[in-house]
Image (cartoon, rainbow, N blue to C red):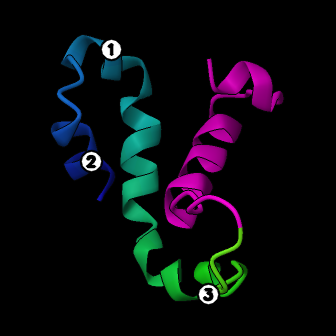
Amino acid sequence: MILHYLKEQSIPLEQLLPFAKDILLLESLNLPQLQPQLEAFYAHEGRGRKPRDPLKMLQSLLLMNLQGEISFTQGVK
């Protein structure tokens, strides 16, 4: 799933190489099976803007952790 998303974004391979080990680890976790449980935490009444994909948010959080990033503000830059 992660690899498919990265291909769609046309991210140059050189930019991905530093993260290759962590990306493959996340890919091996089979996180898509958690999608229904993660979506259960979101309001379904349509309040506010459309929520971000909870699976991508979890993957981002895990990748930041694997990279040793402890700040959300710095991690998204």
Q: Position of residue 70 (x, y in %)?
A: 82, 30
Residue 51 location, quadrant: bottom right
Residue 14: quarter of image: top left
What amino acid is labelled 2 in the image? Tyr
Q: CA distance from mark 3 to mark 1?
A: 32 Å
Q: Which mark identifies residue 15? A: 1
Asked whether disc 3 touches disc 1, contact meaning CB atoms under 8 Å apart, the reply is: no
Residue 21, percent from left and from top? 41, 36
Q: In the depicted view, which residue is nearer to us: 47 or 55?
A: 47
- Looking at the rendered structure, which numbered label has been put on residue 37? 3
In the rendered structure, which amino acid carries the disc numbered 1? Gln
Q: Nearer the viewer, residue 63 or 7?
A: 7
Question: Quick one: quadrant of the C terminus?
Answer: top right
Residue visible at 47% across and 70% down? 31
Depth check, mark 3 against mark 1: the one in front is 3
Determine crowd level at label 3: few under 14, some 14-19, many 20+ residues with C-alpha closer than 10 A.
few
Name the amino acid type tagged 3. Answer: Gln
- Verify whether residue 30 appears in magenta: no
Secondary structure, mark 2, is: helix
> Which residue is tagged 2?
5
Whether the magenta-drawn stretch holds residue 61 is answered as yes
Which is nearer the N-term, disc 3 or disc 2? 2
Question: Which numbered disc covers residue 54?
Answer: none
Residue segment shown in magenta: 48-77
